[in-house]
Image (tube, rainbow, N blue to C red):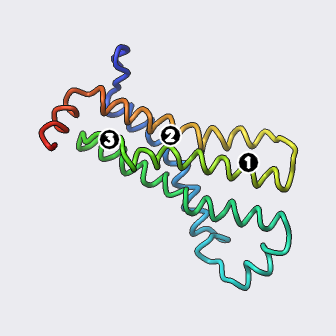
Amino acid sequence: MNVGTLRVSRWVLALEMALCFVPMTFGWFDIMFGVSGVAWLDIASVEKYYLGTTEGVAALTKMLAGAVIGVVGPLGLLVAVRHIVLGRALRRGWLSSALIAGPIVFGVVYVAMNLATDTEWTVEWGGFYVMFVALPIACTAHLLYDGYSNPDARASRASTA
């Protein structure tokens, strides 16, 4: 690692990106296609099990937010692989904004729905925030920084512009 620029080797970057985006990818896959995933919900089961109670509405809201926002996990993995294999840097724009804002919105929804059903702080909330909010944001910021501090990436951006 070059301490002055925070650039690391591709292998270290691959490990870092896997630790940041794989948990969110597995979480998204489970929320979408798991045993009680969003893909298997129908209107009758939503009305029967979720819309009758505050806890049900909160659980459904967290599931739907995880299904929509959780796509940040696979998307982050694709961006990281593109950067590691092809050397194509993440640029500032809608994609980087979505990769940073998505986990923040997911964290806000998670806390709001937990507070709607239970006002007591639990230890699991801290683990959730580290794994599904802080790590994806930190890795996206590292991808952005690496792209803008890399002279090769700047040269390729200048040649394509």
**For residue 60, what is the image quadrant?**
bottom right
Residue at which label 1 appears: 111
Q: Nearer the viewer, residue 73 or 159?
A: 159
Of marks 2 and 1, the one in the foreground: 1
Position above or below: 110 against 141? below
Q: CA separation, marks 1 and 3?
A: 30 Å
Residue at the image position 76 percent from the left and 55 percent from the top? 113
Q: Is residue 152 left or right of residue 61?
A: left
In the rendered view, tell whether residue 136 sits above or below residue 66. Answer: above
Q: Residue at x 30, y 41 (%)?
A: 83
Seen at 16% across and 36% down, the residue is 158
Q: For the residues carrying marks 3 and 2, which lies nearer the camera in this image? A: 3
The N terminus sits in image quarter: top left
Residue at which label 2 appears: 19
Whether residue 20 sits left or right of residue 126 in the image: it is left
Q: Which badge, 2 or 1, is on the more N-terminal residue?
A: 2
- Amino acid type assigned to the residue bearing label 2 in the image: Leu
Label drawn at residue 91: 3
Q: Secondary structure at mark 3?
A: loop
Q: What is the spatial separation of the Cα atoms under label 3 and label 2, in whole angstroms? A: 21 Å
> Contact, CB < 8 Å: mark 3 with mark 2?
no
**Residue farthest left in this picture:** 159
